[in-house]
Image: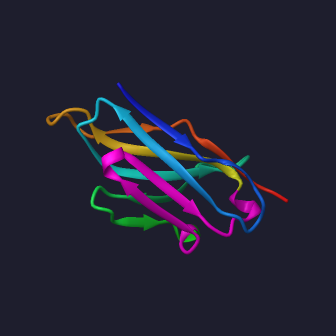
Amino acid sequence: QVRIVTSGGGLVQPGGSLRLSCAASGSIFSINTMGWFRQAPGKQREYVGIITKTGSTNYATSAKGRFTISRDNAKNTTYLQINNLKPEDTAVYYCNAGLQETPVAGIILYWGQGTQVTVSS
């Protein structure tokens, strides 16, 4: 059984920084991509960025410059560093992982439970 745990959210003042973590555990053979999304109150979930197994990244236009995604394959963990936080960054941040549970299994997308980020003075 696979488990995705997202952590690191909290209340931050504008201009501050946060690093969110997303750890996958359980029956995992290989993790392909790990992605980050966010959902602000009253809005649809939106794409933030993604990182491949080899470390290549892609970001939403709105995330370029202040958001950095990294990954530790040994720990099956991805990180989202957010700098110069703004009130409009307030949202629940989710991660997902596209992974194989066995060498012959297809890639299945698993989601974490989300972590709340609130940016307010």
Instruction: Tell me the quarter of the picture where residue 65 sits.
Output: bottom right
Relative depth, front residue between 77 and 39: 77
Q: Residue furthest front?
A: 74
Q: Is residue 106 above or below residue 46?
A: above
The number of numbered badges drawn on the structure is 0
Residue 103 coordinates in the image, percent (x, y) = 15, 36
Residue 58 coordinates in the image, percent (x, y) = 41, 66
Instruction: Please identify the quadrant where the C terminus is shown.
Output: bottom right
Relative depth, front residue between 119 and 37: 119
Relative depth, front residue between 103 and 107: 103
Rendered residue at 40%/39% (across/down) = 24
Left or right: residue 81 versus residue 27 is right
Rendered residue at 25%/33% (across/down) = 101
Report the magenta residues as a range: 63-89
Instruction: Tell me the quarter of the picture where residue 30 sits.
Output: top left
Rendered residue at 28%/35% (across/down) = 28
Instruction: Please identify the quadrant where the N terminus is shown.
Output: top left
Left or right: residue 25 versus residue 79 is left
Relative depth, front residue between 61 and 33: 33
Q: Residue furthest left?
A: 104
Q: Is residue 77 above or below residue 88?
A: above
Residue 99 coordinates in the image, percent (x, y) = 30, 41
Residue 64 coordinates in the image, percent (x, y) = 53, 72
